[in-house]
Image (tube, helix red, strand yellow):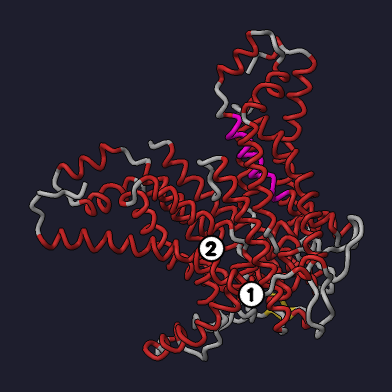
Amino acid sequence: MRRSSSLNWGDLLFRRVTLGFALAVVGIVLVLAGSLVWNSRLAMKEFGWAFLWGRTWDPVAVKFGALPFIYGTLVTSAVGLLIAVPLGIGTAIFLAELASPRISEFLSFLVELLAAIPSVIYGLIGVFVVVPWVRTVVSPSVSAVLGWFPLFEGTPYGVGLFTAGLILAAMIVPFITVVSREVLLTVPRSQREAALAVGATHWESVWTVLLPYARSGIIGSIFLALARALGETMAVTMVIGNVPEISASLFKPGYTMAAVLANEFTEATYDLYIHTLIEIGLVLFAVTFIVNGIARLMLSRMEHPA
Amino acid sequence: MSGRGIPYSTVRRCFNAAAFTLTGVFAAVTVSTLFFILGFITWHGISAVNVDFFIHLPKPVGEPGGGMANAIVGTGKLLLLASAIGVPIGFFAGVYLSEFGHNKLGFWVRYAADLLNGVPSIVMGIFAYTLIVLPMKQFSTFAGGVALGIMMIPIAVRSTEEFLKLVPNSVREAAYALGVHEWKTIVFVVIPAAIRGLLTGILLDIARVAGETAPLLFTAFNNRVWSHGWMEPTSSLPVMIFTYAIAPYDDWHRQAWAGALVLMFLLLLVNGGTRLLLPRRRVVT
């Protein structure tokens, strides 16, 4: 980059143009946030904060509470993380520690391809493969053993919170695997060697040295995955059952914030209804903003250790 | 690193072996998910794809046959418009970041791009709805293209910046030393040096939004006949897959699988192809 004094008009113009486009990116984000707030004003004025813990969703009676959707979003994301975190970190350890560099590269490319599969295709597999499987195999066998426990009781529908969480797990596992693997690969050789030199087994060196060293990076990858799970729409919409109720059982149908937007937005017949849906979008935007922010913070701490 | 010859206790040795075996099993599960998905799509899709699928309009409910020709063209038009919006903004913003962005403003532009990248796709749909569908009072290809175009910006910004930064500074300095103007250096020296990476980044960016469904649901909407021009609602492959998958007709399910196979084939082609062109490129961002 040159000092401004040596620039002619062509250079200045070029700088202005690129600057303009750069500012446009910032502008789009501001307009996005502003338009969500502006277009949900009727709902905010009508319901206030109580919207977030209202339990009734009845557009016909003009009663709107977002709690069933918030609950569904949180539970499905939690199920997804519960499955994807061990799977992703385990895979990352295998790729970083055991697999030879070439195999590791190739396998992580395959894992990345999982992230390139469109959400609607996950949904398609969900509807025709996973839902029947959960209905006929998973749900009955789990209920037979643990059916007395509220979390697992109920008629096996196939669709529901558990199925949605299972599909979310497959969708977010690439984020945890790929980022954690890269983080593990950046741990200095001296760290491993020090652990092995004092007599640790290979696994003990991973567990007591590598993972703690890479901790903030791995946590960052988990938050990155969580943000994806919270905002995931199509696959969840197709398998969750779309019932705005709060049920303790994971095998019962539910609803998420993203799913209600996908289903009801084009059916919203009056302004307050639309504003209410947009407010749900605003909540989703704010939550993913915070979760992504935490992820970036953790990952940047890994890049510039204190 | 296996520690052969060191007299570990049997318990520790067994634990070591067991723990690593478990990571191997996890890796096998993760990777086989991909083959499981691709296998099902191929198995269900291959028998449903035929020439009709590519050249015919959807038939009314109850009549078997028909295809998704309008959805394929619709997806093409949407991607064209999305690229026309997303690529220039993302590209020039990326040039700014790489060449002039070592300042406070650069930080904010990167931050904004990251934020935009994290916005759930359905929220992007709402944004395009309030921006375009509301004022124009109709669903349109234009609105869908804008939604996808905005989604393309963050990846275009970051991949452009990344690949331009790979061009060594000595190349820029060599041009300056010959008295070449700054803008000519960037346009005729730096960008051509990075062109392969830049094109790959854009191609992957297009592939990423090609399968997006949620932002199109209430922008481009859907259409069972041809969509003319840019201001009519249009069908697209992902929305058709969604609509057909949740409908109660067997023939529609068959076509949803066919659509999934076609879409997946194109995406694999782009992702695999760019991987061969450029070995180190992350798809996950």
Residue B197 colored in magenta in the image: no
Residue at 80% in and 15% down = A9
Q: Residue B40 occupies which quadrant of the picture?
A: bottom right
Residue B154 colored in magenta in the image: yes
The x, y position of residue B101, in whole percent, is 63, 28
Task: Report which residue position mark 2 lands on.
Answer: A171
> Mark 2: which amino acid?
Met
Residue at 76% in and 56% down = B127
Q: Which of B75 and B144 is in front in this view?
A: B75
Q: Which of A155 and A271 is in front in this view?
A: A155
Q: Distance between the residues labelled 1 and 2?
A: 14 Å
**In the displayed structure image, the side of residue A42 where residue A154 appears, left or right:** left
Q: Which chain carries label 1?
A: A
Q: Principal SS element in the magenta part?
A: helix
Task: Say the numbered circle drawn on residue A238.
Answer: 1
Q: Residue A107 occupies which quadrant of the picture?
A: bottom left
Magenta stretch: give its range: B150-164
